[in-house]
Image (tube, helix red, strand yellow):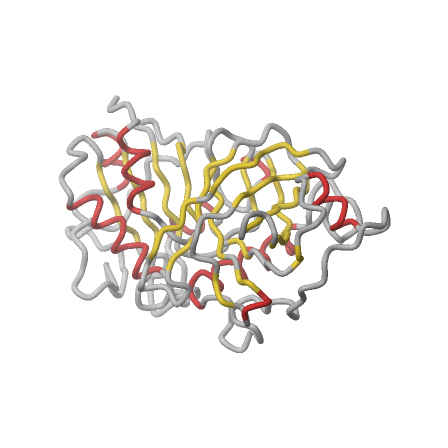
Amino acid sequence: MSDQAPATVLSRRTLLVSAASGLALAACGGSSDGADGGTPTPDATTTPVASGADSVQAQVLAAAGLESAEVRLAPQLTWGELIVAPDQYLQFVVPDMAADGALVTTPVQLWLVDDTGTVVVGPMESTWYPDDRLPSGGLHSVAVTVDAPGVLDVVVAADDATAAGTAAIQAMNAADSLAPGPGEVIPPMSTPTVDDPQGLEALCTREPDCDLHAMTLADALAAGPTVLCIATPAFCSSAICGPVLDDVLSVADSGAFPDVQFVHVEPFVDAGVTVTPIMEELALPSEPWTFVLAPDGTIVQRFPGPVVPEILDDILAGMPTT
């Protein structure tokens, strides 16, 4: 039940704009005017939610038991899609518009409400992961499972449920997503390596270069479970590729997962203009992307935008090695 007319599937362009805005937000924090490229946030309000049946937001909040909450939170997601699959991670920040857009950095309660006014997930408590490399200082994350496609309202509440807010997200099957999703297969591709950079102007734009270019994706999958990170620290449109690659590298270098292969691929052949074959093959609409793959290439998890090392640790700890 979002403020727009009911719909089963948001348009591809709507989702793409939402996705791009979310990634910019993750890089830039919650700007109140959007001047830094982040998603503009609404005007501040501390008015209690209306109780009339004509208020869609009132109905959504009522479904979560938040009739008396002040509508002052403006949750902003890092991606506009949620795949219909177990344990998909919602990552977001929560500006408090009654505090000049200051971000809520303590856990919040979360619900997902469908277009019939039914709570399909929640309440669940988010985990706040601090990250000083992001202007937001970190982000909230929570793993959720939805059973059917549709437009959902994301409801968050803080301060003992006295403050709340909503955002919309599209739940969809992986086959309908903007990018490959859990359950789909990424083929064993011959990606650039130190021995064969395949025409890239820079095999790695991190400074210094990372060491995740020793083998192709095909070779990595032949060896076992694989984490594939597609990111360009030098030319990233969302400005978070550097931190994402560093986070993946930190998990790889920890030595905790000797049976897992880690591969980094730059999304551009040149200075952010010509996309690499893997971007074309996967039809990725943005960067960065991180995929956790079973040895047969099946996607176990995907992360558009930020990667939390602790979450990646947990996922890999539960991965079969064959």
Q: In the depicted view, which residue is nearer to us: 187 or 312?
A: 312
- Residue drawn at point x = 55 percent, y = 57 percent: 76
Q: Is residue 209 above or below residue 33?
A: above
The residue most toward the bottom is 35
Whether residue 247 sits left or right of residue 106 in the image: it is: left
Give the quadrant of the N terminus. top right
Q: Give the residue at x 61% y 39%.
A: 112
Residue nearer the viewer, 23 or 266: 23
Is 134 placed left or right of 63 in the picture?
left
Q: Where is residue 270 in the image (x, y as percent from the top left)?
A: 33, 67
The answer to which of 103 and 226 lies nearer the viewer is 103
- Figure label count: 0
User: In this rendering, would 90 be left or right of 114?
Assistant: left
Q: In this view, does 92 lie to the left or right of 277?
A: right
Looking at the picture, how far across and down is residue 195, in whole percent? 15, 51
Q: In which quarter of the image is residue 74?
A: bottom right
The residue that appears at 79% across and 54% down in the rendered structure is: 50
> Which picture quadrant has residue 203?
bottom left
Q: Quadrant of the C terminus?
A: top left
Position in image of residue 287 (x %, y %)? 42, 56
Percent x, y of residue 79: 52, 51
